[in-house]
Image: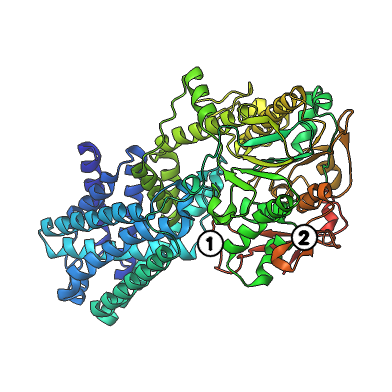
Amino acid sequence: MDLPVFLLATLTLLLIFRVLSSSRLRIPDGLRLALGMLAIYAVLITALWYDFRPGVLLGVAVAAAIGTVGMYGDGLTRLTDALGRMRLPLYLLSVAAMSALILLVVPITTFLTSPGELNLHLGYLVSVNARDAMLMVYVAAMLYMLAFTARMRTLLTVLALTALVLTIIYTYAAPLGYPAMAGLTLEQVPQSTATIRWRAVFDGALILLITPALCWALLRFKARQFLIGIVLVKLSLAIVVAARISTDRVGEAGGAEGGLVASERPLQFSRTEPNVLIVFLDRFMGSFVESILQDHPDLNQRLSGFTWYPRTIAAGYNSIAGVHPMLGGYDYTPLEMNTRHQPLSKLSAEAFSILPYNFARHGYRVNMVGPRGMGFTLEGDCRSLQIEGVTCSHVPMSGVKSRAEQLGFGLNDLAMANYADLLVLLGSMRSAPYALKAVLYERGPWRPFMDQSAATTFREWAQLQSFAEISSTSAEQSNFNFISNLLPHQPVYMGEDCLPRSEPYEVSKEELQRRGFNHLLTLQHYVAARCSLLAVADYLDFLKSSGVYDNTKIVIVSDHGIAASVADHSSRAIAGGTTASKYVGSRSVLLVKERNASGNLQVSETFTPNAEVPRIVCEEIAGCVNPYLNNKPIVTDGRDDPFYVSIVPWQFTAQKPQAFVIQTQFVVRGKDPYDASGWSELE
């Protein structure tokens, strides 16, 4: 904290404390203290806006302690007497509990949804962040020792206790609210000034309510009861973390390390035998296809033999809800999985195993490349797929590295320590008061993680571009191929020229309005979707030139639409009154090419949820069965009307062990997801 800022903060608080302690101000002592806490909070927000560094927190605490020198009369004497010898233990335990909550509990239980999600060893995170939490306690202890009056030490104790209570409230009781998130990425959706102001008012009101309540409780029950309460809070937090750790393979990275890159050419095709190819484009909103075809009419010829099904829908707004029915059929929607009362990780592996099992037993060689989400891990844990005749691997990085060298794009992955820092930032975003969230969002040290987001966009773009390079067209037997790509999910750093950028792609508000987009995030998603479909078309050209296009059934599909405050201005959405974000989250994409199909791209208005994909591809082998449900046939069986869209948290660990946590349940009737009258919400 800069010296001028520190001196200004100290002088400001000294003057405020002097005014609040004056006998001329006839207000209750609890309200005096509450207004003082509100002043400290305002000074903290201002100081962090000017200079966002961890040292500012310590500097404001020191300024507040020194500011007590300006108090008239008895000041904090009654609270000092009430705290007694319990003041130091209460202070240290409050700091320790708050540190553990922000640095350990929230990162582990809320954001680190599986060890495979970040390739981050959970044991490493615990050890590093536990060290940092203890460092915060040591610094707090030194500050307490340097406080040379009882009044200073009492203020520090009340400040720590109030901060702990507020942290617990904002973590578990108050909604997250700001900003919208997808995965571990903060969406670039601006918050209105009015929203920020109302949330700041909420902060102030809560401080004015909590502080007098704590003051009264300390005077009424003394410090010992608070000490016992904080010990119980710490014990409960420790139990939560221990339970979370026990559910993971601590010390294992999972994810990409869980599977092998079996070959530099994991995608295999036969020129003489039938093949199947599923291209999974995560978060591709299906209605974008209309505008893409308008911008690139040549795709009507390049997507020869394909049929586009615009009236498709996913079972949720995110991958955890949408990917399982996309690969396992209607038996793996969140509602159906909840009826099984079995571990969701097991059911997830089942859903990913349906197609490999059936095609392998019909003589196909099965190649699952990048099965994201399998076994409730983001990258896909290939250890969950143990079926004879099935190869599970991840996309080779050779194509990514060569393109990085060509374009001079740095691909230095974030160190595990930086990932730990990211989780702390996200934990702070959840636990901080709203005004502090806004400052953290605008001024926080996000730059290293934004650079990593740019690298992620580059990686997904390069992997998509390398599909031809990782394909072999000389196999003798039939092959079933599945490959996934996240480029539509990582849109911020993709340029209009379909080349990745090191800085976010942005345009002016005037340009957004001219092009008909409600805000920048919608345009960014459209650009990424357009570039993804063009890259897939390039790959299809390769399959044509290699002589395997005609004898290959191809499905291009996504698991959900865009779960953010975006609008859909496609003709079908406008006609049906479903332009709002409520409908956009489940608006997946589906294009299908039968073997030996030809001619320009066709459009079918038939209602075809992405849960129909297993049935569609299984037509190649006269149908599939579910070996985990007594060989139940993979069929529609009337489950497309009504169709259920379940809104669940995006985190794996936010679910119950044997059930999805369904926050909102939509029912779509009439087999038309674009018709608003067919949508209803179950109470």
Which percent across, then down, holds residue 518? 68, 37
409 vs 19: above or below: above
Secondary structure under tag 2 reads: strand
Three-letter residue code for mark 1: Ala
Query: Which of the two labelled residues, at mark 1 and mark 2, occupies the earlier sequence position?
Result: 2
Q: Nearer the viewer, residue 607 or 23?
A: 607
Side (left or right) of 324 relative to 136: right
Q: Residue furthest front?
A: 476
Which residue matches tag 2?
625
Secondary structure under tag 1 reads: loop
Q: At 44% from the left edge and 32% from the top edge, which residue is drawn?
A: 451
Q: Nearer the viewer, residue 196 or 324?
A: 324
**Which corner quadrant of the image does residue 489 belong to?**
top right
Mark toward the viewer: 1 or 2: 2
Res. 66 in view: yes
Which percent across, then down, holds residue 22? 24, 62
Q: Nearer the viewer, residue 575 or 312?
A: 312
262 vs 250: above or below: above
- The residue carrying pointer 1 sits among few (fewer than 14), some (14 to 19) or many (20 or more) residues within 10 Å by Cα, namely some
Task: Give the Cα distance between marks 1 and 2.
Answer: 31 Å
| Label ID, residue 654 | 1
| Label ID, residue 118 | none
